[in-house]
Image: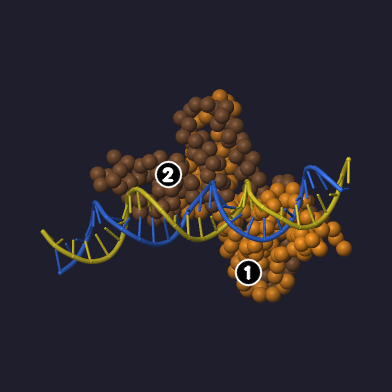
Chain colours: A orange, B brown, C yellow, D blue
Amino acid sequence: MSRTVPIGTVSRETGIKVPTIRYYEEVGLLPSPARTDSNRRSYDAAAVQRLRFIRHARELGFEVEAIRQLLTLSDQPDRSCADVDVIARSHLAEIDEKIARLTALRSEVQRMVDEGEHGRVAECRVIEVLGDHGSCLHDRH
Amino acid sequence: MSRTVPIGTVSRETGIKVPTIRYYEEVGLLPSPARTDSNRRSYDAAAVQRLRFIRHARELGFEVEAIRQLLTLSDQPDRSCADVDVIARSHLAEIDEKIARLTALRSEVQRMVDEGEHGRVAECRVIEVLGDHGSCLHDRH
DNA sequence: TCTTGATCCTCTAGTTGCTAGAGCATGTAG
DNA sequence: CTACATGCTCTAGCAACTAGAGGATCAAGA
């Protein structure tokens, strides 16, 4: 059988603070782990990976409800294909939009770094880049 | 002179709720706008664009402090190149990491959609994709 | 002009997603 | 067998909103 670890170790391995791990359990993102005889939580590798997923997804700006859905996708053994598809597609669109916006922001910040290297920071369009309407990043003036 | 609009219009145009706009003003992300004779806020186009930037940046998972820095970059007329460069570079790294993670997540969700179309949802690796260590998205077995 | 409904104001309080601390139990190293 | 780290639960605080009360103002119609 695989090794299980206490919450502090999980915290160190995932970079998620101990109370936050307990919080994720409380709100149902993470299944309640087994307990030792002395009532301490003991986590397996799957729990650690799930926590890492939660952390990264949060850093990427997904809200807890969206993460719950993505985790549910992942938990589905092989059933309810239609539901899974609907959820997956909507998240795909969301992800594409995030990538598009980040790519635009990236190139603008990169330009600032490049120009900064030559001693002058030209006028900055960071705001314009992310400040535009819609998701299509249409050509600017 | 350019048209200015009341807060409700700004809210509709940006998708940010009225109290949230006032909150952004309170915490210094948005400069206090001009007021009408009857003390109502009136916003110009620049304010609207700045709010759209804030919204998108928040959706992308940047915290308020990071947004404040990015906005400061944008507000710099042409001074303090070194500071700007340091800030820009650190955000560049952060942005690259976000893009890498999102791209990985995207391809996994895409795979689920593709396989779902053929009637079966294969085992899902969404968690594995974002659950990995570090930022390098190293090759999985 | 008067009124009625939408919109604005300020201020306070609630929600979400954590995060820190009190007070006590347990585990482990010397 | 201390002693100090780590765990437990529970309560309270913080960041970033969000909603509502109570009151002023504006804009359109009778």
Task: Answer left or right for C8 relative to A48.
Answer: left
- Packing grade of label 1 (10 A; few <14, some 14-19, many >=20) is many
Task: Answer left or right for B6 relative to A86.
Answer: left
For the N terminus of chain A, which image quadrant? Answer: bottom right
Which chain letter goes with mark 2?
B
Residue C5: image x %, image y %? 27, 65
Q: Are marks 2 and 1 on the same chain?
A: no
For the C terminus of chain A, which image quadrant? Answer: top left
**Going 52% across and 29% down the picture, which residue do you hit?**
A121
Task: Answer left or right for A135 relative to A44.
Answer: left
Q: Is A89 situated above or below B41?
A: below
Residue A32 seen anywhere in this rendered image of the structure: yes
| Residue marked by disc 2 | B26
**Location of residue B44 (image quadrant):** top left
How many angstroms separate mark 2 from mark 1 (CA)? 42 Å
SS at circle 1: helix
SS at circle 2: helix
Residue B137: image x %, image y %? 73, 49
**Going 74% across and 48% down the picture, which residue do you hit?**
A12
**Contact, CB < 8 Å: mark 2 with mark 1?**
no
* Mark 2 or 1, closer to the camera: 2
* The one of B27 and A109 positioned closer to us in this rendering: B27
| Residue marked by disc 1 | A85
Residue B106: image x %, image y %? 65, 57
